[in-house]
Amino acid sequence: MNALASSAPDSAPAVAAGAAIATPKVEVQKLNVWFAKNHAVKDTSLAVQVHTVLAVIGPSGCGKSTFLRALNRMHDLVPVARVTGKVLVDGQDLYTREVDPVLLRRRVGMVFQRPNPFPTMSIEENVAAGLVLNGISGNHAEVVERSLRKAALWDEVKDRLGHAATSLSGGQQQRLCIARALAIEPEVLLMDEPASALDPIATAKIEELIHELKEHYTIIIVTHSMQQAARVSDHTAFFYMGELVEMGATEQIFTNPKERRTEDYVTGKFG
């Protein structure tokens, strides 16, 4: 992949107040996303430091998930979608022609809103699926165990790896999908409302897992729950009508926001 060009963006990316100056793991520069004539994400710039969790919040339809999916080029699969701007990981632009989207998604993994295990595969086969699809050889059993341990699921399924993935509970299925994403060793993990379809106990396990995973990964999570954002994230970005209104340390966003729209949202005046 090509190195980041030396020219600076027209506007500096949003960074958390007091954050150390360092090369960010993920940097977004003047990102725009259209679906036909609908301008869904507007001129967004921000930076995410390594081994931190960024929560993306905002009302329904504000562009949260659209923004997230732009980070690993999921919109390439949508014929009417158009993306401009830059998304950089370790200073390298993921939208250059030289970048293979399939290889990109090994570096930037994705966990979706609803658990989506492959129904015809066993638990073990689900975790190894990404390895097989990417032609990664070696000891898959070792990778499966390591990934399930990282997803805090190994002890619950180690004696039934050959069972159907659909035999698991909803919360277990979501952790299985996280294990599947981790098996191909991404550097960045994108999570699109990963607990929205789960009960409170399963949600708590996912949140505990996020705290553990950030020691090894940089995580960007879209959530409809401000309480969840407050619990799991280091930094929070508030989107409204396709625009990034404000980004900062999570405590600052929830206790002392700089923008009136942010304050109105986090205090429940709209949403």
Image: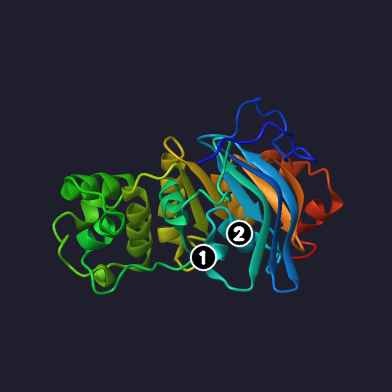
Q: Which residue is mark 1?
A: 196
Q: Residue furthest top?
A: 21
Question: Is tag 2's residue or tag 1's residue first in the polypeptide sequence?
Answer: 1
Helix, strand or loop for disc 2: loop
Q: Which residue is mark 2?
A: 225
Residue drawn at (60%, 50%) of the image:
229
**Residue 158 on image: x %, y %:** 17, 54
Q: Is residue 214 left or right of residue 14?
A: left
**Residue 258 on image: x %, y %:** 83, 43
Given the image, on which type of amino acid does mark 2 rest?
Answer: Ser
**Residue 41 on image: x %, y %:** 71, 60
Q: Quadrant of residue 165?
A: bottom left
Quarter in which the C terminus is drawn: bottom right
Q: Which dot marks residue 21?
A: none
Residue drawn at (31%, 49%) of the image:
183
Helix, strand or loop for disc 1: loop
Q: Nearer the viewer, residue 223 or 118?
A: 118
Q: Nearer the viewer, residue 140 or 227?
A: 140
Given the image, on which type of amino acid does mark 1 rest?
Answer: Ser
State whether residue 102 is above or below residue 36: above
Q: Nearer the viewer, residue 61 or 255?
A: 61
In contact (CB < 8 Å): disc 2 and disc 1: yes
Q: Nearer the viewer, residue 110 or 258?
A: 110
Q: Is residue 200 left or right of residue 87?
A: left
State whether residue 182 is above or below residue 19: below
Residue drawn at (45%, 68%) of the image:
114
